[in-house]
Amino acid sequence: MVRCWMNYALFDWFNRRLRKFPEPIARIRSRAEWDAFQAGSAKRKIDEYDNSVIEAHRHDQEWVFRGYSEPAQSEVDFIVDLQWGGRTENGKSIPNLRERLSCPITELNNRQRLIATLLKNQTKSTSRAPDIYFMEEVTAIFHWSVANLENVSSITGSEYLGHEYKSGDIVNGIHHEDIHDLSFDDASFDLIVSNEVFEHIPSPTIAFGECHRVLRPGGEMLMTTPFFVGYDQSLQRARIVDGQLEHLLPPAYHGNPVSNEGSLVFFDFGWDIFDMARDGGFSDCVIELYHSPRFGHLTVQTVFRLRK
């Protein structure tokens, strides 16, 4: 297995950013702001660095990248391979770094470690211990959060187990919730965490409305979802009509921790996801961008932060 370390003397720009992590390198509220970021020097330097790392391992199907895992509180060799969307193209290995750079201690990948770090810092600095709702319950990041987040009042998790159950049911020890119709009372939570869930929801605006309903005033939702920056309008891949599933495009599935069949993708989100969130009631919608080689975060990571 090949190892890769940064040479920080060659990357002064990243050193400056390192001292500020986990502050975002940019906050984006529109496609125009994204386009300006794309055209700027910061994005150019990020791309140059990330491409140099991938190029150095063009013939390696598995390698490691040395850095500091904040959730593990340890220097580790982050694992990179061709799982979860990686591919070989013209003899060159191209990993999906968003889904890899996995911490061998916590088993959290790139985007999951970022969310874990944001949660750790946010809960540590708040004056009131928050109640948190996770749209997952059997995953590594949920278990890490239960074990490691301090100054928290409660952490509630759930999975979607099928249309035959109603929200709030406990099925084989797992809490079931349909995000379209949550079982929780109004203003139950201070923070909602949604990792790679909304692309699998048939009616995102209704789901955003439910999230807004169960948040307290001033509450926030942290969300990751595949985001297609070239799309002004989201691409709907499937829908439910009169209770029946209708495919509008060839079906696509992502991994599902409670089903070997995977989760069907209903939407490839574009910039109108902001409109969906606002229609659901959220007053402030922003995409935060993160990048930090020192902490093993290669490629620009996008986190949606929605505020009630």
Image (cartoon, rainbow, N blue to C red):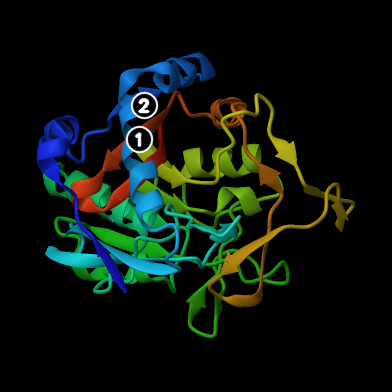
Is label 2 in a helix, a strand or a loop? Answer: helix
Within the image, what quadrant is residue 91 found in? bottom right
Give residue 59's position: percent from left, percent from top.
45, 63
Q: Residue at x 36, y 26 (%)?
A: 44
Q: Position of residue 234 (x, y in %)?
A: 68, 34
Mark 2 neighbour density, 10 Å: few (under 14) some (14–19) many (20 or more): few
The answer to whether residue 74 is left or right of residue 208 is left
Q: CA distance from mark 2 to mark 1?
A: 6 Å
Tally the numbered discs: 2
Viewer-side residue, 271 vs 306: 271
Q: Label 1 near label 2: C-beta < 8 Å?
A: yes
Q: Which residue is mark 2?
A: 44
Residue under circle 1?
A: 48
The residue positioned 30% from the left and 68% from the top of the image is: 2
For residue 28, which quarter of the picture? top left
Instruction: Point out residue 179 in the picture as x, y percentages from the top left corner.
Output: 58, 53
Give the vertical position of 10 relative to 123 (above or below).
above
In screen coordinates, is 220 left or right of 85?
Answer: left
Q: Amino acid at mark 2?
A: Arg
Q: Amino acid at mark 1?
A: Glu
